Image (cartoon, rainbow, N blue to C red):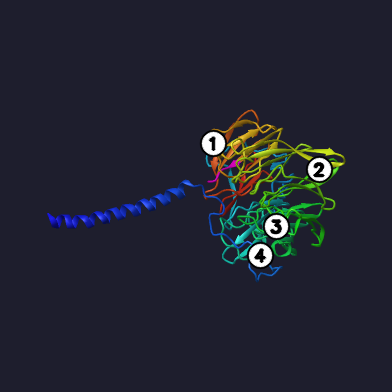
Amino acid sequence: MKKLVADFIPMMFAVAGVLLLMHLWLGADAAVNLQERLPGADSKPENAGAADEPVKIAGTLTQSDGVPADLPGAWPRFRGLNYDAISPEKVSLSRNWPAEGPRLIWSVDVGEGYAGAAVLEGRVYLIDYDQANQADVIRCLSLGDGKEIWRYSYPIKVKRWHGMSRTVPAVTDKCIITMGPRGHVTCLDSKTGEFRWMLNLVKEYGTMLPQWYTAQCPLIDDGKAILAPAGTVLMLAVDCATGEIVWQTPNPDKWVMTHSSIVPMEFGGSRFYVYCGGSTNAGGVVGVSAKDGQVLWKTEEWRVRTNVPMPVIVGQDRIFLSAGYGQYDYGCTMLRLVESGGKIAVTSEFVHPTSVFGTMQHTPIFYSGHIYGVGMDKRLACLDLQGNVVWVSTSANTFGSGPYAIADGLLYVLDDSGVLTLVEASASGYSQLARAKVLDGIESWGPMAIASGRLIVRDLNRMVCLDIAGQ
């Protein structure tokens, strides 16, 4: 009996040890599985770049056998031709799909990230990252078949930090402007890929890169690249043809770069650029003159540290703003501009917490008097201009952090896993027309592009072009 007890006790300790290890392992695993994978989950990158990195980086242009397509559609920048994620093309689009979804026209492998496409004159432009060669890569593909026309690459070390590239180029018939993950702004000839100039925002303007690398998409307006380094200067304009600085905006409040992009607006006879900047005190929103870079108005009514969505211009005098990352009190707001004594004053019409509406990554769409977007509960919502929820999709219809855009009165919404849903863009209610899985990967978060009856979407490692034209 004593021998049996003696043998049994070590066995019990061994079993208890195994059970304890299983508990710890399963507990840790469960925590990971229950927590949404957010940007920033990987190793944190060096913010200021390598000390020995040159200010200007020499690149390499490689020509390939791709040919531009003879197609007229354009989506030349982040959120399309008019900065609103709405295609203005008069193209009839299909309102239903077969079970497998819209026809796949082409597919290409891309480096890990969320960078979306720009489209112009039958060409598709993308900033990518080549992990094998440790280089930012600016790619020009054919809209017709996805074959590469040219690529321009420059060596830059980027640590994997939940993907690398995440911006959309700005393109004209003369040039393309890109912003790389670590703040390298590059200008190339949009047809040939030949190098024109480069700015290193970190080295030249003291930019502090935001968490998860840069997501600010460059803007081209009146032949100038408009950028917000938010370092030694808040904003600047660069002549696209020469690379010369046209004007610079001082940054006395020491605002820092956010993920939000710049959008142009006209009010009271002035054209200016609206930008959401950040700071240790949460920053604010500013309107910078397109003429000379002077600050025309500034407000701290919107104080958000992690601002991702771009400002949405609503009519002639309002700006809708939204946020999500850790911003519980600041989910969305509507700013109104008012002329007062020859100056522009700014008031906030409402501020709603994220429990009413807020957005993590993608910018809501103002369309036909209403605002459409995917809220913090991952459901598609329609808001009126007072921020009240008009309708919301059911819990069976959720979309994660994927992108959305409108064309031909139809709302295209992509979820995290690559399921594309077609919805009526109407304030009368959620009306789903079609749904299909179009990507097999994960984190299908890259902004959409719509041109010539084609939809370009991507997941973490693959970009596809789909035929959405009416049959």
Q: Nearer the viewer, residue 51 or 140?
A: 51
Marks 3 and 1, the one that precedes in the sequence:
3
- Give me the disc on residue 397: 1
Which dot marks residue 153? 4
Pointer 1 with pointer 2, Cβ within 8 A: no
Disc 2 target residue: 266
The mark nearer the N terminus, 2 or 3, is 3
Looking at the figure, which quarter contains the C terminus?
top right
Q: Is residue 48 magenta?
A: no
Crowdedness near tag 2: few (<14), some (14–19) or many (≥20) residues, C-alpha within 10 Å: some
Q: Which residues are magenta?
A: 413-418
Between circles 2 and 4, the one closer to the viewer is 2
- The span from disc 1 to disc 2 (Cα, nearest Å) is 37 Å
Q: Amino acid at mark 3?
A: Thr
On the rendered image, what quadrant is the N terminus found in? bottom left
- Circle 4 SS class: strand
336 shown above or below 239: above
Earlier-in-chain disc, 3 versus 4: 4
Q: Identity of the amino acid at label 2? A: Glu
Q: Residue 357 lies in what quarter of the image?
A: top right
Furthest residue toward front: 281
Q: Which residue is mark 3?
A: 178
Q: Position of residue 450 (x, y in %)?
A: 67, 45
